[in-house]
Each structure stands twice: as C-alpha cells, then as structure tokens.
Image: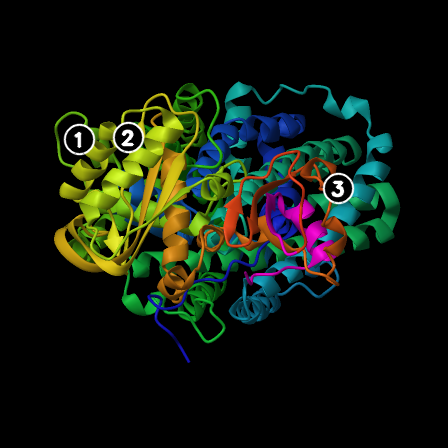
Amino acid sequence: MAQSADTVKLTKELRLLDVYALATGATLSAGLFLLPGIAAGQAGAAITLCYLIAAIPLVPAVLCKVELATAMPKAGGTYYFLDRSLGPLAGTVGGIGTWLALILKTSFALVGLGAYVSLYLEPSPLLTKSIAVGFALLFAVVNVLGAKKTAVFQRLLVGGLMLILTIFSVLGLPEIDPTAFSGFFDSGPDAIIATAGTVYISYVGVTKVISVAEEIKDPERTLPRAVFLSMLTAVVIYLVTTSVMVGVVPMAELSGSETPMAQAAEAIAGKLGMAVITLAAVLAFFSVANAGILSASRYPMAMAGDSLLPPGLARLGGRGTPTRSIALSVGVVIAIVLFLDPLGIAKLASSFQLFIFALECLAVIVMRESGLSSYDPGFRTPLYPWLPLFGIFAPFFLIAAMGLMPTLFSLALVAGGIAWYWTYAKGRVERRGAVFHVFARLGEQRHEDLDSELRGILKQKGLRDDDPFDEVVVTASVVDLGADEEFERLVGRAASALHAKTGTEAQTFVDGFTEGTKTGATPVSKGVALPHMHLEGLERPFLVLGRSSVGLTIEGGDVFGQQTTTDGVHAVFFLVSPAGDPSQHLRMLAQLASRIDEDRFIEEWLGATNEVQLREIFLRNERYISIELNPGGPAEALAGLRVRDLDLPEECLMVAVRRAGRTLVPRGETVLLSGDRLLVIGEPGPISELYARFGESRAV
C-alpha cells in the first residue's frame, strides 16, 4: 500500500562499494563505447587530450557537490542543493533540467545498447527500440524493489565491466602504433576545446549517485571516498582506452564510428575480442540505465515533497521506494526512445550539465557566506573561494566553444523550468534559499526555516568520530532537584557546577542560560529543556544533567522559537561549548535531542536510581560497556586488581566505578572489589572485544 512521503523515509542501506558501483556504472557507458568515434571525427588523434581537458572543470564541480552532499544528504541531489541555497526558482530549473538530462542519458544508453547488439542481429530500428523499451521496463522493476537490490545488481554489472576493460587495456597498450598520433594537433585548438565540451557528458554520471545520498550509510565518509575513487577510475579508463583506440584503429575507420571499442577489440584480438567488448558494452549500458533510473526517480520525488511538482510523486510504495516517480521517469525514457532521437538530443545535454555544475559551485559560496552554523559539511572544498570561483566560470568557456545549438538547448531548459515555477509552483512555496542569509548580513531579509531544516539534517547525520560526546556525558555533573526547588534554582546549581569545572564565574552561565530561555533560544519539548551557550576560552564542551521528579515550569521558547510557558519539565540539560566550533555544538545538541525523542526516554530518566544510570541513558551502545564484578561471573577475576593492572584495550577508558551505592572516580591505585560495577567507554572495535570477554550488565 502506498504511503505518504511524510510518514515514510528512504532506508539508509547503501555502503561504499554500492555507491562506488552506482557512480562508476553511471559514468562508463556512451562516453566510452559511442562518443570516441564522434570525438575522433572532430578532433582526430587528440581525443585523449579532449577527455583530459573535459575532466578539468569536473574537479571543482565534484568537490563542491560532495561538500553540499555531506552537509545536506537528501534525496534529489542537485535540486535540493540549488533550492536550499539559491531558492526554489533555481531549484525548479536545476531539478527539472537535471532530471531531463538524466532521462536523456538513460535513453541514450539504451539506444547505444541496441547499436552493439545489432552487431550480431539483423539491423532494424524497430528491433533496437523494442530491446531498449524491454530493458527500461526491467530496470523499472529492479528499482521498485529497492535501492539495495539495485546496488547489488549494479555491483555485478560494474565488476564484469571493469574486468573486461582491464583485459582490453593490458592487451591493447602493447599494440599501439605510435605513428597514429602524428598530427596530434592538426584539428586545431578550437576543435579540441569544442570536442572536450562534447565528451564532458561522459563524466557527469560520477556525481549522479549524490541524488540518493539520503539512502547512503554514513554519507559524510562514504560519499567522498566513493565519488573521488569513481572519478579517478573514470579518468584513467578514458585516457587509456581512447589511447588504445587511436593507436590500433585507422583514423579513417574510427572517425564517426558508432562502435569504436568493438573495432579496437577486433583489431587487437579478432572476432573473439569484438564479442567480449560487445559484452562489456552491454554491461555498461545496462549499468548506466539502471543507475540512471535510480538517480532520476529521486528528483520528482524530492520536488513533489517540496510542492514544486504534484504531491502524488512524493509518495513511496510498499517497499519504501518512490514508485510513482520511477514510473514517470521510465515512461518518459520509453517515449524518447520510441518517438525522438536520444542520440542527437543527449549530445546537447552536456552544455546544461556544465551550467548546473557552475550553479552548484556558486551554491557552495552562498552556503559558506550565509553564516549558518547549521551548514556543517563533512567534507569542505579546498582552496576556497578560488576553486569554486574557477568552477563557476570554467564551464562557460566550454559552453561557448560547443556552438549555438547546445547553448539554445540549455536556454530552453532554463526557460521551461522558469515557466513551470511561475505557472505552478510559485504560489505553493514560501521558502527562500541561503542566499537570503547572505543578504541578511547586508541588512536584508533572511529565512529562518532553512536553519531549522539544516538542524534537522544534523540530527539525522549524527555525531562525527572525533566529537567528544561520550566523554562529555560521562564527565557531566548531575543535579537532582528537591520537590520545592524551581527552574531558577536549577540554573544556579548548574552554573556553580560549571564554574567548578571551567573556572569561569558562575554568573556568566546564569546570564547566558537565562537570556537564552527568555529569548526563546532554549528548546523545550516532551518534558525536556536544552539551555545552551557558547563561551570563549573553553577547550571542550561541558554538560550538566538536571532532573526534577515533580516537574518544573519554564518560561521560554519551544523548538520553533515561539514564546511559551511549559509545565512538567523533568529533564534539563545545560550544554556549554567552545565559541570557535558552533557546528560541533549543534551536533552535540542534535545527539541529545535524538535520544530525547525516543518514546521511553522520560520513563528511563525518572527511573534511573543513580548518576551512572543517568549518564548511561545517553551513551551510545557501541561505545560503552557496563561490567559487573559478580562472583561466578565472566568478570570475577578482575576483583582484587588495581585499575592500572587491568588489561583493557588502549582505546578504552574506565570512567566510573559504582560501589555500595556510591560513584567513585577510578584512579590507577584504586583496587576493584567483588560487586563493583565498572563503566568503560571507547571506540566501537575495542568495546566489542570487551563485550565478547565480559558481556554486559545494566542492573545496579
């Protein structure tokens, strides 16, 4: 049964190899098996140089797009980035245009598949189109089954393709005739630059996987690694294989060929070589069509969820995939295959992709200059702002060199996107992009909902490996209020605890927390309040956990910044962080909020009988273990040992000993006794080792 996009989220199930396979598979297809023949007709033996030049403007575009994706790992990729940075008009133009470009590339791949299959069948336009339509329907079914099944299929395709291309390169390089490269620059610089613009589309698939960032596990680490590795793979393969093609196939035959790889393979290894490369071409076109449908379908879904397209496209099917968006994308692919010339149209799409990459480089500058502390990418583009600026201007040189028709095609897509926005979407959206936060620095209007949305994304992404959340929790001060104590009393006690740890005057904390509460900067929800502040001179964050069994009344703001009076607040968490790292501060708040959102949080909070149990509520299971030294238990042998003599992994730290109702701070000379309960934190791997040795006890 279809479910609303509001109630169902895409599942995070794609890992590094899945993402690499999707990115690489979306890149190695027509650019390898079709375009070299067309490029040779324009640039002659210099096609290898054309592919290298085409990769240059790709570098800043890829770096900027990865930065945006690690900050905002949401479905829709390019659309989402442009919408949230430059506003919904730019998002509409970029989303519709990129979706159509992906559709054209997918159609192009399916028709290219027919060109290679026809090498062994009686050539027939009807047969080619029938094959293309049949595989489009097959890939639609695969995508409806889920991104993970799509990725498994993709890994198999890309694995087979890479094996064949490696064999082709190893056998082909020794067969290269150096004289084939004589007259390398005869076509002239204008032809070389124009051809580089034409083959640029060969690389754009490497970033299309970013449109499924919401379905990637740990996107901050996985996306950069997968995309950069895929880009390196694509550049190396294009340079090597085009060199082999020029070196073994006479230029007169290579120029204009629709099957250049097959001709090169036949020259190297005869009919067997041609058959093997035909198989590689089939795998490549399968791969790009499969990945193309997966990526393309996320654009209508994301745009519909933001009211830029009809809302039905945002709904997910019973398997948690955007069934309607997949059906629309595949339907348009089939229509293009049957009624248009995808080969001719797809060549024009390069110019629009260049334009979009320029906008994405601009988006990075806008997001950085917006001053939003909630913009927190896991990867940052180096050489800022010079590399993004190069990425903005470099594509237009290639666009200009490509001629009039590609430019007109891009302008038509832009005009179509603008027309759709003004006739359908404008009255349905009230968002503004981060560019308004740049204007705010000049005294203009800003849009606070974007900051709230980015904070929500931080909550979804979670902590980074170097965030000291667990250390902050285990060293947190705990304040249990009496029945007659009020919120102001709790603030004072928390300020005193922070003064003892930081040396900063207690009144500084009282003023900071009180002012934040009065102005609505303190989130209050579900019986929990989160007063927080930054402070110059701190080396790390500090936390105070406050509990009221009877419930407090707080005058302040809710999570939306509205002024309210809230009763029944049982938990108050005071977080103070260094002023120089606002993003880490927000990640810490987001981690606290994630735990608070769990259904049984207040029940567990009020039911905790001591400080150790209160802290354990917030510790991540994979990063701590509670070990009880019971007679006959797996940790029995630890009783009688000094803490310094324990055989704990290097990346683990014992932070507390619970003994006879008291909490002790362990020191090297502390002797452990039978019945003690130890709290140990550390990295996930070493903690797993301790689980294997001692198991776990959560009772006190």
Left or right, residue 85 beside residue 12? left
Mark pair 3, 1: CA separation: 56 Å
Q: Residue lying at the far front in this picture: please name it.
A: 660
Residue 166 placement (x, y as % from top left) = 79, 42
Q: Residue lying at the far bottom in this picture: please name it.
A: 1
Q: Quadrant of residue 635?
A: bottom right
What sort of colour scheme is used for the picture?
rainbow
Q: Is the Cβ of the residue at disc 1 closer than 8 Å to that at disc 2?
A: yes
Mark 1 residue element: helix
Which residue corresponds to the image point at 23% horizontal and 38% vertical from the top-left? Answer: 513
Q: Earlier in the sequence, mark 1 or mark 2?
A: 2
Residue on which the image places disc 3: 647
Query: In the rendered structure, which amino acid carries the disc numbered 1?
Result: Ala
Residue on which the image places disc 1: 440
Residue on which the image places disc 2: 371
Mark 3 residue element: loop
Residue 447 placement (x, y as % from top left) = 19, 42
Q: Looking at the picture, does residue 623 appear above or below residue 394?
A: below
Mark 2 residue element: loop
Q: Nearer the viewer, mark 2 or mark 3?
A: 3
Q: Earlier in the sequence, mark 3 or mark 1?
A: 1
Left or right, residue 584 beside residue 640? left
Q: Is residue 584 visible?
A: yes
**Residue 352's mark?**
none
Which residue corresponds to the image point at 51% horizontal and 32% vertical from the top-left? Answer: 58
Mark pair 2, 3: CA separation: 47 Å
- The residue nearer to you, when weighing 5 against 403, is 5
The magenta span reads 675-700
Q: Is the Cβ of the residue at disc 3 closer than 8 Å to that at disc 1?
A: no
